[in-house]
Image (cartoon, helix red, strand yellow):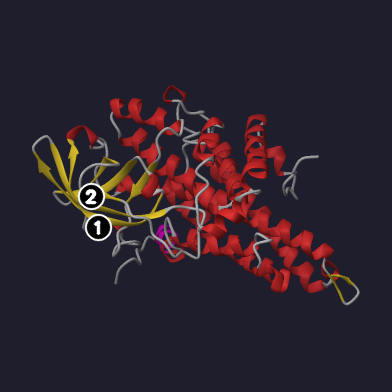
C-alpha cells in the first residue's frame, strides 16, 4: 500500500480526478526520489542536481502555464498540490521548483515578448535551462522599492550595475530575471550566465535550506541587449506580481512540511515507551498531536479555497498574504513542537523534524516576512498604511 497522506476531513472529495492524479504522481516522486537522499544532501549542503531532469519529465516546471510553451497547463490547485508534496520532502526542493516556475517562467510569460516566451519557456520547462530571480538586495529586502541596482541606456541595450542577495538557484542558473531601476522606474532584464561582468558566487555557511543553492548576483557594467528587456514590465508592481505567485506556492508548500513533521511525531510517539507505555498515551503529547492535525486540516482547506479563487481570477494578493503568513507561522510552530516530542532524538537527522524547522525559519522570512504580510492585510482591512511613520 502506498503513502496515503493526511486527510482528516475528507478533503480528497473537494479535488478533481486530475488534481488527485497530479498529487499522487508528485507524492510518489517525493517518496522514491527525494526522501531517500535528502538527509545526505542536507548534511553535505548540496543540491540534488540530478533531480532536475526527473522533475522536468513530470512537467513540474511552470505547470500552470500554457501547453504551447511546453508546460502542463494545470489549474492552480494542482500546482499547489505539487508544492505541498515537494516540500513534504524538503523546502529546498520546493524552492527550486517555485523559483523556476513562479519567479522565472511566470515573469517571462507575463511580461516577456512572444519571441522571449517561445525561446525561453520550453527550455525552462524541460530543465535544459535553469533560472533565478534577482530582486532582493543586501540593504533592501522588505523594501524592494529602495533598490540601488541601476540600468542605463547604452548603444544597442543597457549597462547594469549593482548587486542582489539571497538568490535561490543563482550560481547554477543559466538565466537571471533581474530587476533594476532605469530612469528611476523598475524594469525587468534577462541576464545570461557568462555575460561579462556578471558573477553569481554561492553563499556558504547556512544552517537553513542546506539542500538548496543560495547566491549573490553581482553586476559590474553588464551589457544587456535591447531584446533582453522584458517589454511589458514597468514599475514595482511587476516584480511584486511575481512574488505573489511565489507566496501562493509557499502557502501550499509549508503545509507539506507540517504533514511531514506531524506524521514523524505521531509514529515516534506511538513507538517510544516511557513510564511503561507509549508517550502517545500521555495527555500532553496527545494535545500536541491534535493541535498539529487541526492546523494541517485548516491549512489544507484554506489552500484549496485560495486555489479556487485563483482559478476563477478572483484572488486578491492580500488573501495570498494571509495564507502565506498563517501557514508559515503554524508550520514552524508544528516543526518545533514535533521536535519536543522526539526529545533529544529530535536533533538527529535520522528524523526530519529539525531539518524542516530550520528550513522553515527561512521560508517564514522570504517572499515577505510575517510582519510585512501583517501590514499588507492590516492596510487592506483598515484602509490605513502602517508601512512608514
Badge 1 density bin: few <14, some 14–19, many ≥20, Cα 10 Å: many
The answer to whether residue 234 is visible is yes
**Sequence-wise first label, 1 or 2:** 1
Magenta-colored stretch includes residue 227: no
Find the residue positioned furthest to the top: 68
Quadrant location of the N terminus in the rendered image: top right
Q: Are marks 1 and 2 in contact (CB under 8 Å)?
A: yes
User: In percent of the image, x 41 and y 28: which residue is there?
Assistant: 122
- Image position of 220 (left or right of 170): left
Indicate whether 114 appears above or below 23: above
Residue 368 placed where, x, y %?
42, 58
SS assignment at label 1: loop
Residue 68 percent location from the top left of the image: 43, 22
Quarter of the view holding residue 260: bottom right
- The residue shown at (59%, 55%) is 40
Of all residues, the one furthest to the bottom in this rendering is: 275
Residue on which disc 2 sits: 180
- Span highlighted in magenta in the image: 375-380
Residue named by callout 1: 147
* Residue 318 drawn at (x, y percent): 44, 53
Image quadrant of residue 204? bottom left
- 10 Å crowding of disc 2: few (<14), some (14-19), many (20+): many
Determine the secondary structure under disc 2. Answer: strand
Front residue of 163/109: it is: 163
38 with respect to 222 (left or right): right
Instruction: Name the image quarter holding the C terminus.
Output: bottom left
Q: Indicate whether 69 appears above or below 91.
A: above
- Choose between 248 and 227: the one closer to the eye: 227
- Compared to residue 232, the image places residue 389 above or below, namely below
Residue appearing at x 75%, y 44% in the figure: 4
Q: Position of residue 294 (x, y in %)?
A: 70, 59
Q: Residue furthest right?
A: 276
Amino acid at each position: 500500500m502506498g503513502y496515503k497522506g493526511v486527510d482528516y476531513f475528507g478533503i480528497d472529495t473537494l479535488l478533481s480526478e486530475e488534481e488527485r492524479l497530479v498529487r499522487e504522481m508528485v507524492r510518489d516522486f517525493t517518496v522514491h526520489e527525494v526522501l531517500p537522499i535528502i538527509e545526505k544532501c542536507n548534511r553535505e549542503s548540496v543540491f540534488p542536481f540530478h533531480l532536475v531532469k526527473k522533475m522536468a519529465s513530470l512537467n513540474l516546471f511552470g505547470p500552470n502555464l500554457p501547453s504551447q510553451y511546453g508546460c502542463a497547463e494545470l489549474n492552480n490547485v494542482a500546482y499547489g498540490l505539487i508544492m505541498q508534496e515537494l516540500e513534504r520532502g524538503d523546502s529546498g526542493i520546493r524552492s527550486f521548483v517555485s523559483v523556476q516556475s513562479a519567479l522565472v517562467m511566470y515573469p517571462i510569460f507575463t511580461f516577456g515578448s512572444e519571441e522571449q516566451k517561445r525561446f525561453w519557456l520550453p527550455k525552462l520547462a524541460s530543465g535544459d535551462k535553469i533560472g533565478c530571480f534577482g530582486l532582493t538586495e543586501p540593504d533592501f529586502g522588505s523594501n524592494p522599492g529602495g533598490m540601488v541596482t541601476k540600468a542605463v541606456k547604452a548603444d544597442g541595450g543597457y549597462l547594469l550595475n549593482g548587486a542582489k542577495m539571497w538568490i535561490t538557484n543563482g550560481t547554477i542558473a543559466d538565466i537571471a530575471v533581474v530587476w533594476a531601476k532605469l530612469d528611476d522606474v523598475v524594469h525587468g532584464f534577462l541576464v545570461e550566465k557568462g555575460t561579462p561582468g556578471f558573477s553569481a558566487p554561492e553563499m556558504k555557511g547556512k544552517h537553513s535550506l542546506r539542500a538548496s543553492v543560495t547566491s549573490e548576483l553581482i553586476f559590474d557594467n553588464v551589457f544587456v541587449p535591447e531584446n533582453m528587456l522584458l517589454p511589458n514590465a514597468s514599475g514595482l508592481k511587476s516584480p511584486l506580481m511575481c512574488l505573489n505567485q511565489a507566496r501562493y506556492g509557499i502557502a501550499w508548500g509549508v503545509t507539506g512540511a507540517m504533514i511531514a513533521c506531524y506524521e514523524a511525531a505521531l509514529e515516534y510517539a506511538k513507538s517510544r515507551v516511557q513510564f511503561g507505555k507509549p508517550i502517545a498515551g500521555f495527555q500532553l503529547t496527545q494535545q500536541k498531536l491534535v493541535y498539529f492535525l487541526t492546523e494541517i486540516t485548516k491549512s489544507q482547506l484554506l489552500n484549496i479555497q485560495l486555489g479556487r479563487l485563483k482559478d476563477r481570477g478572483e484572488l486578491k494578493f492580500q488573501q495570498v498574504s494571509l495564507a502565506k503568513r498563517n501557514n508559515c507561522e503554524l508550520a514552524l510552530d508544528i516543526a518545533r513542537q514535533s521536535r519536543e516530542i522526539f526529545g533529544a532524538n529530535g536533533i538527529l537527522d535520522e528524523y526530519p523534524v529539525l531539518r524542516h524547522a530550520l528550513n522553515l525559519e527561512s521560508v517564514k522570512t522570504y517572499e515577505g516576512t510575517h510582519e510585512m504580510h501583517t501590514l499588507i492585510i492590516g492596510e487592506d482591512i483598515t484602509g490605513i498604511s502602517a508601512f512608514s511613520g
